[in-house]
Amino acid sequence: MTPRRRDSATIKDVAREAGVSYSTVSRALNDSPLVNDRTKRKILTVAKRLNYRPNVHAQGLARGRSHMLGFVVPDLRGTLLMEVVEGAERALAEAGYRALLLHTEWELEIEKEHVEYLRSSRIGGAILCPIGRDEEVPWLRRLAREGFPVVLVDRYFPRLEASHVVTDNVLGGRLATEHLLRREHRSIVCLSDAESHLVTSLADRMQGFRETAGEAGLGPDQAKVVTFDLQSEVPREFPTLRRLLEGSQRPRAIFAVNDIFAMAVYQTMSRMGISSGEIDLVGFDDARMAPFMPLPWSSVAQPKEDIGRRAAQILIEMIDRGSGHIVRESLPPSLIVR
Amino acid sequence: MTPRRRDSATIKDVAREAGVSYSTVSRALNDSPLVNDRTKRKILTVAKRLNYRPNVHAQGLARGRSHMLGFVVPDLRGTLLMEVVEGAERALAEAGYRALLLHTEWELEIEKEHVEYLRSSRIGGAILCPIGRDEEVPWLRRLAREGFPVVLVDRYFPRLEASHVVTDNVLGGRLATEHLLRREHRSIVCLSDAESHLVTSLADRMQGFRETAGEAGLGPDQAKVVTFDLQSEVPREFPTLRRLLEGSQRPRAIFAVNDIFAMAVYQTMSRMGISSGEIDLVGFDDARMAPFMPLPWSSVAQPKEDIGRRAAQILIEMIDRGSGHIVRESLPPSLIVR
DNA sequence: ATCCTTGTTGAAAACGTTTGTTGAAGACAC
DNA sequence: GTGTCTTCAACAAACGTTTTCAACAAGGAT
């Protein structure tokens, strides 16, 4: 082999310099109790002087696992994942782990590739936000079955044996609805996505809405659900919303299951000349743009960073303890009143 | 060593199964010309059948370099970096590279740690968005000097021997100003940050503004620069802006050097009851929330994804070619008129 | 004295690749 | 036949760690 530029001191350099064998150096660096304190101190001094840093590949090879993890996310453009990733990265960094960031671009095929890559590259574990709907996740199932440490965020599959951390979306829907009830509304519209039954988080928010409205004695007419499909609406015109807001008996209280919808409502109101005082609007997600709006609306804030942080903690726990113990957590959201 | 669970077939399993030595398998997998085509095909078939995937750590160790790179960014909350990272990740993934995401949290000390980590862990290279102001970057300088492949994004240091990819901010300032001039304004206010002289991107935008205004014959009174410090303003009240917009001789054309400032202007106008038709506002960054505003303003859009993509390409080039060739690129922004 | 501890160290075998070197077999010219 | 070239495959030595095992010394109990 051609000699390579030596990037950094190795364990052998330290050993030679300190006058001990390199196994002793390894032990000293890993703070093993098998090495004398004086020797340990000497070795650490030498290591620092030589600016020794371990070769992660050699460590990964010898240990059979590494301190590298993976994030697999569709993308970061939504209102949630960027902060989740940041929170997780923060917690991981504190524990000495690093994570690869892999985007699936909302493609099942790419997701599968990334997951396979993680498995085969002896990466320690992963935090996933899968795009698959429930049952179309054979590789996820395989992953879990084979004991690869995985934590799902923002999504859960009831029948999948894997840890997850999500927002308590039922509670979120409840908070939003209670807020509107507290303001004396006896008739509330819940604005949701046409495909909400496929997305557990949205379905849960609506369930919270229905439960709370029901408990308050609101009938089906007073607690209506209106769905629309943001993609298929005429760009930026939202005919569905115009229809909803037309006429004098327009709703006075709207719970939008996410802030993108709330934004659409707000924009439509503004276009139709409806003053923002006329309708009580509650969104969900506490999107970054929300507080910047001229007349910001209230929103249910997800504990985004905490989701990431908890997911990281759980993952690290699984790795360090080698436990296959499954943890399912729903973190409580909070209502931001504006 | 305790026997470990065998995660995946190794090169030796393939060799045994195919009836050849494992060095031949390695060569076949790397498509070396030193192995017969028939043998190669057979080996590839067996490898696929056994679901062989190389162990990245072993490869990294043997090759002395890896296909893992690093992103080092302050955070992703701004208007730019998230998309840059996405664009870069996309380009890297296509080329078979993966990247660790490391946040510096705007702390010099953490940045230094991350950079040191990358260097010592034999990572292949990195895309950096450093927080340091110009000369306080000794470790960056060291990195470049030692030939570690690095590409800077969104920032450049004139005296640093390192590649970078940035937006052509001078051109951006020019586009914004020309837009306002085209709309017959003979008096324009440029709203900038109090610390803009420390940030090359903002300084460049202002330079573009001054140049263009000067060429159009606007005097200092007609092309004023107003600076304010978003952090220190009374939260959400922006007294500086109120003062600016008070009175009948308020500016009719404002170029805000970023969309956060544009948002602040918009919000203040709204609070003061100034109709949005009264002032022509141009922002910078094309922030995600901009198009959602009830009356969106125009903005200079940075080629965010392209910055990431180009940075990735340059980095890969440096790594694959082993060339220390320095590439400095300014990508042109474009004006989004709304 | 012998035999166990206990504490500390070193030698050496992994971990799964890449790659320089060697050698075998066949082709071809003499 | 012998010699030289090619083509291909096997051998073996790295890469930098971790970890098992054996070794040795010092001390205490028998």
Image (spheres, coloured by chain):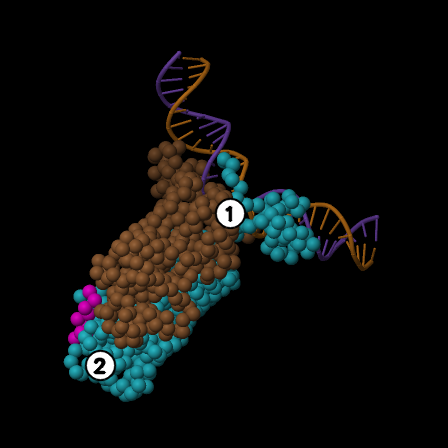
Chain colours: A brown, B cyan, C orange, D purple
- Report if residue B335 is visible in the image: yes
Which sits in the foreground, B1 or A40?
Answer: B1
**Residue located at (40% from left, 59% from top):** A196
Vertical placement of A290 versus B273: above or below?
A: above
**Element type at mark 2:** loop
**Residue located at (19% from left, 68% from top):** B237
Q: Amino acid at mark 2?
A: Pro
Which sits in the foreground, B103 or B251?
Answer: B251
Where does the image place residue A322, in percent across and percent down from the top left? 43, 40
**Residue located at (41% from left, 37% from top):** A27
Q: Amino acid at mark 1?
A: Arg
Q: Which mark is residue A142?
A: 1
Quarter holding residue A32:
top left
Vertical placement of C9 versus A332: above or below?
A: above
Q: CA distance from mark 2 to mark 1?
A: 63 Å
Q: Which residue is mark 2?
A: B251
* Magenta segment boundaries in residue numbering: B235-243
Q: Is B239 part of what is drawn in magenta?
A: yes
**Element type at mark 1:** helix
Q: Is A206 part of what is drawn in magenta?
A: no
